[in-house]
């Protein structure tokens, strides 16, 4: 038989042995470990055939994506998006909330420690005595204690929860990057449209001046009796119609200016962009290798991280099949006299362990696991659809830019021919060879050709922006937060 000292040593070693056993068991983690499912990735972009290679100066390696346009005004405006855009502030707050949820889940790794102190004074009811007189007593009680409870993560429920929350927070970070890129692209598209509207306004103003000269010629011919009054009226109508178009451009320009102000987080009333003469070259954007798109688009990265989070939730659901084990301990003092409260004779302590598991739940756990697996399959499908959509957008923009470049060359030829026809027709009218209706037709054709050329330029600039956006705008998945979100968590152990 062991002596008292041996029994005390054994009593001290048993809880330590039990704790060591739980730590070893806690290396088990139920649920599938995450492996990124494959996604359909082409070998090369279909619409890249015949594409002009980008020059190194246009690639803007390491620089903000909008620097390829070499426009200091655009650079200044886009940089304000990060500072004041309210949608970005909301997305950033959502990311901070997701990080806080990671910290909240990580708290499950550690015990919960509480401190309690109480004092009570109570009077007991009257009791009968042999003398027939009632008696009562007043009793004091004081106690103070410290307690700790800890759920042993034997089956990895907490680890899988943290894993899911970390992946969700990374998806939130990708959503923030996607919102930033979208706001920047919206501003750039609006800016280019505004600049082209200024050029159309300048074209219309110059055309009004040219039409006024034609009107003066027609009035002089009418004055000497070689032109009809109808020619004068038609020339006057052409001047006023063109002037009306020039005024109408101001509606869209004002709205674009207001939209840019809001994207920058400013009230439209306090913001303006003065019109200037503008000319821009459409940059050639290197699309890169298709497989890189999986790492360069924040929306694809967000879909992939949500897929990882859903995978971890399967482990959380499966852990419910196993018992939850909780360890508890407390130590304190209790006495009826506060003077004697903190003495050794007043000490009280307790150690305990509890294991609980539902025996029958009507299929609740099985349904939860099935729901988690279905949610994961849904995320896989959404991820693959996001990848397909990303490739579609790149192919769309590549083909649009290539076709628009060809159209622009053809349209420039049309502009030159229309201008020549306009001058020849006006000369013939002055010589009395043709009617004024031919002049009106030639002038309208020349104006429409020049307006169409500017519209094609605006579409090419906007498409180049959307191509950069569809390629990720220089962002990469390596920018997602990682170790800082996992700081303080134990290393992920292998499954049993």
Image (cartoon, rainbow, N blue to C red):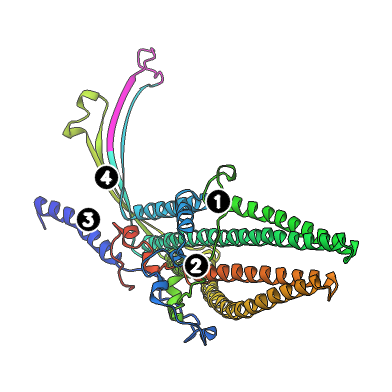
Report x, y in % for residue 422: 73, 73
Nearer the camera: disc 1 or disc 4 = 1
Report x, y in % for residue 470: 51, 71
Q: Which residue is mark 2?
A: 299
The earlier-in-sequence mark between 2 and 4 is 2
The earlier-in-sequence mark between 3 and 4 is 3
Residue 191 to residue 478: above or below: above
Q: Decide which of 188, 473 is in the foreground and name it.
A: 188
Q: Which residue is mark 4?
A: 350
Q: Are marks 2 and 4 in contact (CB under 8 Å)?
A: no
Residue 147 to residue 446: above or below: above
Is residue 7 shown left or right of residue 299?
left
Residues rendered magenta in the picture: 125-145
Q: Decide which of 104, 342 is in the foreground and name it.
A: 104
Q: Decide which of 415, 437 is in the foreground and name it.
A: 437
Q: Main secondary structure of the magenta part?
A: loop
Q: Secondary structure at mark 4?
A: strand
Mark 1–mark 4 distance (CA, rounded to whole Å):
74 Å
Q: Which residue is mark 3?
A: 15
Q: Which residue is mark 1?
A: 273
Nearer the camera: disc 3 or disc 2 = 2
Is residue 81 shown left or right of residue 350?
right
The residue lying at 69 percent from left, 56 percent from top is: 249
Residue 490 position by quadrant: bottom left
Q: Which mark is residue 170?
A: none
Mark 1–mark 3 distance (CA, rounded to whole Å):
74 Å
Q: Secondary structure at mark 3?
A: helix
Q: Is 131 in the magenta? A: yes
The residue lying at 11 percent from left, 50 percent from top is: 4
The earlier-in-sequence mark between 1 and 2 is 1
């Amino acid at each position: 038989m062991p002596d008292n000292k041996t029994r005390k040593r054994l009593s001290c070693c048993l809880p330590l042995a039990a704790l060591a056993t739980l730590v070893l068991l806690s290396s088990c983690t139920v649920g599938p470990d995450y492996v990124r499912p494959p996604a359909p990735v082409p070998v090369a972009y279909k619409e890249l055939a015949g594409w002009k290679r980008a020059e190194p100066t246009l690639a803007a390696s390491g620089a903000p994506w909008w620097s390829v346009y070499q426009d200091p005004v655009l650079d200044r405006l886009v940089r304000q998006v990060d500072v004041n855009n309210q949608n970005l502030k909301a997305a950033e707050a959502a990311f901070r909330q997701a990080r806080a949820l990671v910290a909240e889940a990580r708290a499950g790794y550690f015990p919960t420690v509480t401190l309690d102190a109480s004092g009570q004074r109570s009077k007991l009811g009257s009791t009968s005595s042999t003398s027939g007189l009632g008696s009562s007593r007043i009793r004091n009680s004081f106690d103070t204690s410290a307690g700790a409870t800890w759920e042993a993560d034997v089956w990895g429920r907490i680890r899988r929860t943290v894993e899911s929350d970390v992946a969700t927070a990374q998806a939130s970070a990708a959503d923030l990057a996607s919102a930033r890129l979208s706001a920047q692209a919206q501003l750039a598209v609006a800016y280019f449209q505004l600049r082209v509207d200024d050029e159309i306004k300048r074209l219309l103003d110059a055309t009004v001046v040219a039409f006024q000269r034609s009107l003066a010629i027609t009035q002089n011919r009418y004055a000497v009796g070689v032109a009809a009054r109808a020619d004068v009226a038609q020339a006057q109508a052409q001047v006023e119609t063109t002037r009306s178009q020039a005024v109408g451009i101001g509606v869209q320009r004002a709205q674009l200016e207001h939209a840019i102000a809001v994207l920058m987080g400013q009230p439209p009333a306090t913001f303006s962009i003065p019109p200037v003469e503008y000319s821009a070259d459409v940059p050639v954007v290197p699309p890169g290798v298709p497989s890189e798109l999986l790492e360069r688009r924040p929306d694809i990265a967000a879909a992939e991280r949500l897929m990882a989070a859903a995978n971890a939730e399967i482990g959380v659901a499966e852990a419910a099949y196993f018992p939850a084990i909780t360890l508890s301990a407390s130590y304190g003092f209790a006495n009826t006299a506060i003077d004697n409260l903190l003495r050794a004779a007043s000490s009280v302590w307790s150690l305990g362990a509890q294991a609980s598991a539902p025996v029958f739940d009507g299929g609740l756990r099985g349904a939860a696991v099935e729901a988690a697996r279905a949610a994961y399959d849904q995320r896989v499908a959404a991820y693959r659809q996001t990848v397909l959509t990303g490739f579609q957008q790149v192919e769309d923009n590549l083909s649009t830019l290539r076709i628009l470049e060809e159209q622009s060359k053809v349209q420039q030829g049309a502009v030159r021919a229309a201008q020549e026809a306009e001058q020849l027709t006006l000369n013939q009218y002055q010589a009395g060879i043709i009617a004024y209706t031919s002049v009106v037709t030639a002038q309208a054709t020349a104006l429409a050709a020049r307006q169409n050329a500017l519209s094609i330029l605006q579409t090419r600039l906007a498409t180049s922006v959307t191509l950069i956006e569809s390629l990720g705008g220089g962002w990469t998945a390596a920018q997602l937060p990682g170790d800082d979100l996992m700081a303080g968590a134990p290393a992920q152990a292998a499954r049993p």
